[in-house]
Image (spheres, rainbow, N blue to C red):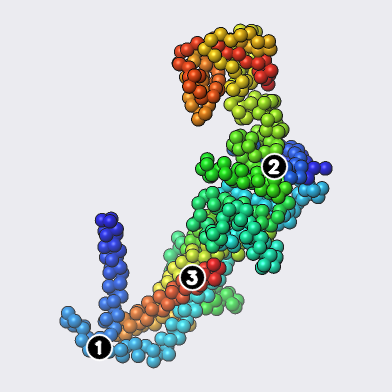
Amino acid sequence: MSYIQFQNIHKSFGSNEVLKDINLSVEQGQLITLLGPSGCGKSTLLRCLAGLEDVTAGQIFLNGENITGKSPKERKMGMVFQQYSLFPNLNVYENIAFGLKMKKLAKDKIDKRVKEMVLMVDLIGKEHEYPYQLSGGQQQRVALARSIATEPQVLLLDEPLSAIDAKLRKELQTRIRQINRQLGITTIFVTHDQDEAMILSDVIHLFHGGKIEQSGKPTELYTSPKTKFAASFIGSYNILSGSDFGKIIGEERNAQKNFAIRPETFTVSPNPLPFTEGCHHFHAIVESHISHGNVLRYTLCTNGVSFHVDVLFRSFQLFEIGQKLYLSVEKKNCLEI
Amino acid sequence: MKREKSSSILIVVICIYLILPLLLTFFYSMFQQWNDILPSGFTTQYYQQLFADSRFLSALVRTVLISVFPIFICTVIVLLAMYVVIVYLPGLDRIMQVLCMIPYAIQGIILAVGILSLYVDAPEPFSNRVFMLTATYCVMILPYMYQSIKNNLNAVNAPRLLETAQILGAGKLRAFFSIIVPNILSSIVISMILSASMIFGDFVIVNTIGGSYFETAQMYLYKMLAQSGQLSSALIVLLFVTTLLISVGAMALKSKNKSSER
């Protein structure tokens, strides 16, 4: 049996069914991500695991024990919220020590553990400051330290980095991953940011409309989306109907089918490309381009069908609007979904 | 800079506007005559007279007690009700808000007469005037206590803090009183002071319900007004000092709590 197991979980708020028959397993020490758009049920599942929401039906097992009806206190989990949720009347030291005091540990043990945590999240010298005196990133590190100070069985992170700027977010992503590996603590991370999920996770569970749309390792999910939604949410796939795809490659395709092609899988050249076995060859006109930092995204058009192509931002690959380009794409990269 | 200066001037003007009547009342109580521009005949006899009057001291003690008890009862009831609503029955929040706001719309005299006619023949302790008065004041200050505490609970995101404390191993009740209450202590103290000053200044309710059974400082003042202007001025100053001391005491208690937490 897996370390955490959700069995046939249903959760409704009135007539609104938020979770629909969720079955999910998490292995010990893994960092898994529940990924999906707002309102897909990912945070609700996390709250059900924490004991903050009761499930309407189904069971949750932790290390073989049924914890479905247990209170949050009995589940021994750590949780970090998006809004930090630090206690405003307590300073950094007291916030981190709160859970340890609840466990009735001796004062010297609490002191030792708090100091370890402060060191781990790099907040030395801030112990006596109050939450309002800290930046968003520092507050979130205190929240993280507080949640792991009690050595919880599972660490739950509910969009903890959403309110933090991009640079700091990357730092904290690295820190979360480090903590997960260093302590071997089973971690469940909720996010709507697919890049964040890709960076952090051992396994991603993609949620859509209260159901798990697809589960897998980040690379699996990225390279092999099974549904139109997965393709549109993970990466920036070109999702084309069969007839549009046929127009691009100049072959007949079933109009009922959809095809997903990652924009970076195209080979682009201003000159005709040599024929390669297993590839589709065609040409297109540049409609527009925008820069995404080190990547240039071109919108190209073939026979009235527009699609995106990503190329590395190198000076020799700057193409003009209206320029004719020659493209090829491997057939295996044109996924039928 | 210019803006700061104009704000300072405005604050000074407001302070003068608020303090001047009190200051003049104080001066009036310290002199025997004030028929010209300046008063004459400095004296402390009115204060001595008041402190020598056991009726005044009893009335003052009664006023303090009748202010303190309803406030504590109301605070405890509101906090417990808030705890139940936040933790167990969030759906009742709106109903509680409506219930707590009803007394706000009722005139003091209507409230007092209504309660008196309803409970005057009721069995003890409901027909007891002091009990009736305490309960009436509880009802009267309810909207102020509720709204102030409620606003602060919203500001600190109480449900989320409560969840966090629970996950960290605190029971619901402990989480509420060790985390939520210290964070809303300012609003509790301010609403208590506001309520105390309201009860202190009340004449209508205490006169209607208490009548001759329960003479408070306001009723004593009403009787003094007919006797001597200087004496009633001295009484007003003493009442102000008493409310000020209560407020300072409450604020000091709050600060002490905060510093001991830290």
Give the residue displayed 59% in from the left and 36% down from the top.
A193
Q: Mark 3 points at which residue?
A: B255
Q: Nearer the viewer, residue A59 or B209?
A: A59
Percent of width and height locating residue B125: 59, 77
Chain assignment, label 2: A
Q: Is mark 2 on a helix, strand or loop?
A: strand
Q: Kindly report which numbered mark, 3 or 1, lies closer to the viewer in this rendering.
A: 3
Q: Name the residue under label 1.
A: B42
- Left or right: A131 as drawn, with respect to A212: left
Residue B19 shows in this picture: yes
Q: Is mark 1 on a helix, strand or loop?
A: strand
Label 3: few (<14), some (14–19) or many (≥20) C-alpha neighbours in 10 Å: some
Mark 1 belongs to which amino acid? Phe
Chain assignment, label 3: B
Q: How far apart are marks 3 and 1 (CA)?
A: 39 Å
Q: Nearer the viewer, residue A287 or A125?
A: A125
Q: Nearer the viewer, residue A137 or B21?
A: A137
Q: Kindly report which numbered mark, 2 or 3, lies closer to the viewer in this rendering.
A: 2
Q: How many labels does the image show?
A: 3
Q: Kindly report which numbered mark, 1 or 2, lies closer to the viewer in this rendering.
A: 2
